[in-house]
Image: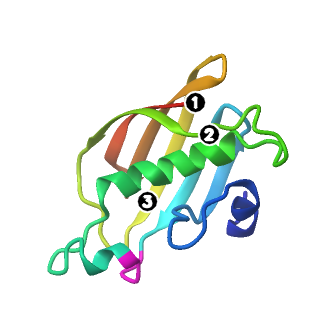
Amino acid sequence: MIDVREIIARIPHRFPMLLIDRVLEIEPGQRGVGIKCVSINEPYFQGHFQDYPIVPGVLITESLAQLAAVVFSEDNNSNEDRPGFLAQVNMRYRQPVKPGDVMKLEISLIKKMGRCCKVKAIASVDDKIVANGEMTFS
């Protein structure tokens, strides 16, 4: 298990853009499972939406991308195996994520293509898929 302190040591994201709280399972360079505990105190809920707060889909995608960055960040001093930037995203959003939800994040390597890699990504709440798809990093 990787806690938030180690996540911060592995990826450059900081509050308010650090969107994963813990990594529960990791096979470096292959797959990972993490969580994001969604709180009403998240800054984006002030405007998305005041009367019906939901996590923006792009931030669900970003949470999954951050998990991928942790999975591929074996060596903090080397960017060799670490995805640098999202190059392509193909996601489907199925249900809203609300304050109080614990979002389970899962990524697994589909294929590596030189300095690029493609991953399968799934976000779920209470064992129901809320978003899924594929992401390519370069």
The disc, 3 or 1, on the residue closer to the chain's N-terminal end is 3
**Drawn side of residue 105 relative to residue 56, left or right:** right
Question: Hey, what amino acid is under mark 3?
Answer: Met
Q: Main secondary structure of the magenta part?
A: loop
Q: Quadrant of the N terminus?
A: bottom right
Residue of label 2: 84
Q: Extreme top residue here?
A: 113
Whether residue 60 is visible here, answered yes or no, is yes
Q: Is mark 3 on a helix, strand or loop?
A: strand
Q: Tell me where residue 100 appears, x and y as whole percent.
A: 37, 75
Residue of label 3: 103
Q: Is residue 1 above or below residue 71?
A: below
* Residues at circles 2 and 1 in contact by the CB criterion of under 8 Å: yes
Disc sitting over residue 16 in the figure: none
Question: Hey, what amino acid is under mark 1?
Answer: Ser
Q: Extreme left residue here?
A: 51
Residue at 58% x, 25% y is 117
Residue at 30% x, 76% y is 45
Q: Tell me where residue 50 appears, x and y as whole percent.
A: 19, 80
Whether residue 125 is visible here, answered yes or no, is no
Front-most of 40 and 75? 75
Q: In which quarter of the image is the C terminus?
A: top right
Residue of label 1: 138
C-alpha separation, residue under disc 2 versus residue under disc 1: 6 Å
